[in-house]
Amino acid sequence: MSSRFEVTILGSSSATPTSRRFPTAQLLNVSERFFLIDCGEGAQIQLRRYKVRFQRINHIFISHLHGDHYLGLMGLISSMQLLGRKKELVIYSPKGLQEIIEVQLSISATELNYPVKWVELNPEVPEMIYEDSQITVTTVILHHRIPCCGFLFREKKKLLSLDKVRITEDKVPVQAYFTLKSGDNFTDENGRVFLSKDYTLPQSRSRSYAFCSDTRFDLRVAEQIEGVDLLYHEATFLHELLDRAEKTAHSTAKEAGIIARTAKVQKLAIGHFSVRYNDMEPLLAEAKSEFANTEIADEGKLFQI
Amino acid sequence: MSSRFEVTILGSSSATPTSRRFPTAQLLNVSERFFLIDCGEGAQIQLRRYKVRFQRINHIFISHLHGDHYLGLMGLISSMQLLGRKKELVIYSPKGLQEIIEVQLSISATELNYPVKWVELNPEVPEMIYEDSQITVTTVILHHRIPCCGFLFREKKKLLSLDKVRITEDKVPVQAYFTLKSGDNFTDENGRVFLSKDYTLPQSRSRSYAFCSDTRFDLRVAEQIEGVDLLYHEATFLHELLDRAEKTAHSTAKEAGIIARTAKVQKLAIGHFSVRYNDMEPLLAEAKSEFANTEIADEGKLFQI
């Protein structure tokens, strides 16, 4: 499968930027359609650094309304305006973000030249919030101090390819083709059944990416993201600070690993590190002790799925 | 005079950050008291870069409520909280900023552990808005698309030093000392007059810094900042884009030079450059054609006054 399905990490810090790290923001590229996931302060600086053209982003997903996940949005909206945007921008977030942005537009006397559509997320029930010809996006219910959603990006199943040799051998009628390609079986007027699996080629599976920021450790998260190719899960603390993690409704690196293992994902990326850590290796080692195929979600890192 | 009176430039860009430049923010250090002037997105990143301890900033002056001058404030306020601040923070700005910040604190369910005092500036009349033992801060009325104030920081006059030789020679009475040090003349009970200038040493003048962002060219600005040691004046465009400057209520580099010359300042620093410019030399040359002692207010530059 050659089309792109990849995530660029724009920020890996929690709470506050440091001199080397930005707060949470990620860019998902699905065949050159760009989706911004969270938008911490300085996200637009990072987008410029990685040479992403702002105007190609049409959908922004904000997990929750702590500053380190949305404070870059107002600046990005302004920059899109200054760069002459006309195209609609759709912003998904829990309740409150529209008010935050509109107060600022009003006080700065800014009238946007492009429409912004606000989609208010329900933080209680997983919902499919986006769909196009290639992917769906479903919310993942997280458990944080304020309403917070993760996002599950999943490729849609494509039509199957026909096995032309067998189609010809068995004289499968043309009117059966679409049904078989769709994965359904076809019965002709004489009652003869053609099974889709007999006349189509095996397809590689749909790729998927789950983004889980910020959440306390909760196995119900694992259920919602089972089997994804890549899971991003926050790992704010080392497990020795479990008390602190529980108090602040965050996860430890060990807990992120347990979620990945339980959910049987292919790969885990951890981030949202507390500013107390300068060296991320102990966090990585701790997550790996639970789930070997773990990587650090460092600024600039590209995860190809 | 050895005490510090110096400005560090944290951002020189207008409108939007670029990969190399941040929006407007400056730090004034008066004998290790720190004053933040404007706070564009990423200001806290720049403060960290230049190793300024956030908690030493007790007063923040915001000129106006376009995003490139205040979008870094919410993040800085949050970071001060996370770093354990208890001390009062005083924020000066035109009407609206308190609402912008309080909406966000409320939606993110954040209760600050330190008091914030909001001072609403009157953008119509210059006012002294701050005074301590060393300096006063007075607003400068600017002319932009929305209410906008500049700030004039001026050292207070200190008491003069007595000329001990002449004091002894002329047997000046002790009760005259304070009057003479204050710059006033003293008359003793016999009607003998002691002139302050005869018994005190010459004092270097009070230092001053004027910050003027953003404004259309207006000679009334020059009147308010006459003779300052350092003038920061925006220079968003080259004069060939005068039309654009007038439409957006900004100044050209040439106009900044004219203001500096008219106000007879000692030195001019220009900034707030349009993102269209990669090379600032033509802007500098243009300002210098009107006022020779001009410098670029580049990120990281320190102006000692």
Image: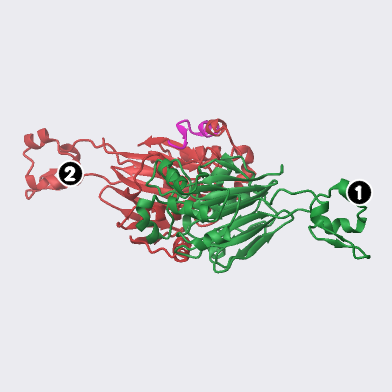
Chain colours: A green, B red
- Residue behind mark 2: B181
* Left-right relation of A9 to B87: right
* Above or below: residue A220 compared with residue A41: below
Q: Secondary structure at mark 1?
A: helix
Residue at 63% over, 37% down:
B240
* Left-right relation of B170 to B74: left
Q: Position of residue A82 (x, y in %)?
A: 62, 49
Q: Position of residue B110 (x, y in %)?
A: 41, 63
In magenta segment, residue B291: yes
Q: Which is more toward the observer, A117 or B119?
A: A117
* Above or below: residue A150 compared with residue B29: below
**Are tags 1 and 2 found on a single chain?**
no
Residue interval drawn in magenta: B286-300
Visible residue check, residue A15: no
- Residue behind mark 1: A169
Q: Secondary structure at mark 2?
A: helix
* Above or below: residue A78 compared with residue A8: below
Res. A46 image quadrant: top right
**Which amino acid lies under the numbered mark 1 shown in the image of this protein?**
Glu
Q: Position of residue B197 (x, y in %)?
A: 20, 39
Crowding around mark 2 (Cα neighbors within 10 Å: few <14, some 14 to 19, many 20+) is many
Residue at 84% over, 59% down:
A179
Crowding around mark 1 (Cα neighbors within 10 Å: few <14, some 14 to 19, many 20+) is few
Q: Position of residue A238 (x, y in %)?
A: 39, 49
Mark 1 vs mark 2, CA separation in Å: 112 Å
* Left-right relation of B250 to B156: right
Q: Chain of mark 1?
A: A
**Which amino acid lies under the numbered mark 2 shown in the image of this protein?**
Lys
Residue at 56% over, 39% down:
A49
- Which marked residue is nearer to the observer: mark 1 or mark 2? 1
Visible residue check, residue B121: yes
